[in-house]
Amino acid sequence: MLQIILQKVLARYKRFKYNRAIAAKALEARFNNIYKEKLWDGKGQSRSGAGSSLEATKNIREVFPKLLREINAKSLVDVGCGDFYWMKELDLPCEYFGLDIVKDVIEENRQQYANDMRKFYHHNAVEEKLPNRVM
């Protein structure tokens, strides 16, 4: 019984933290808060949420590079790239542009994953047009 009560209290606390984080008026501030507070549980893997875990992306990781090769893709624009957790596992056959509204995540991605074929840009895709450098 005590365990059930503790689980409910923890769930309410998480919900409270999430609601407080998204209460910011500006979209960028909302996402910054979500990342800073680690409110999207990525099963201990990704700060981009459970849908970005290696388990959740198993099928797409197997198929996506093959598809890109099949269509002879020259570039890939990933709007809302997040922490690049599962994408880092792929051998992409084309140039990759990762865009995200969270500046700190983009800086981390640049430090850890950027190279001649992988570029990351701070970008608000909701309110801004795609930058020319990725088109």
Image (spheres, rainbow, N blue to C red):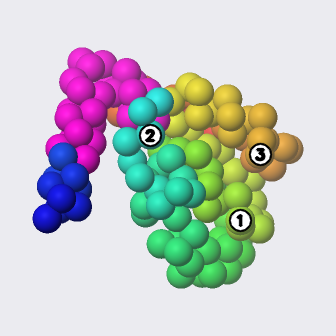
Please tell me which residue is depicted at 71% across the width and 65% down the height of the picture. Answer: 89
For disc 1, the marked residue is 89
Please tell me which residue is depicted at 18% across the width and 46% down the height of the picture. Answer: 9
Q: Residue 58 location in percent, x, y?
A: 56, 78
Query: Which residue is the extreme one toward the right?
Result: 116
Inspect the image, locate mark 1, and give the three-letter code of the amino acid beneath it.
Answer: Glu
The answer, for residue 87, to whether it is visible in the render is yes
Mark 2 Cα-neighbour bin, 10 Å: few <14, some 14–19, many ≥20: some
Q: Which residues are magenta?
A: 10-35
Q: Main secondary structure of the magenta part?
A: helix
Tag shown at residue 110: none
For disc 3, the marked residue is 113
For label 2, the SS is: loop
For disc 2, the marked residue is 38
Inspect the image, locate mark 2, and give the three-letter code of the amino acid beneath it.
Answer: Lys
Viewer-closest of 109 and 77: 109
Image-based side of 24 in relation to 9, left or right: right
Viewer-closest of 67 and 107: 107
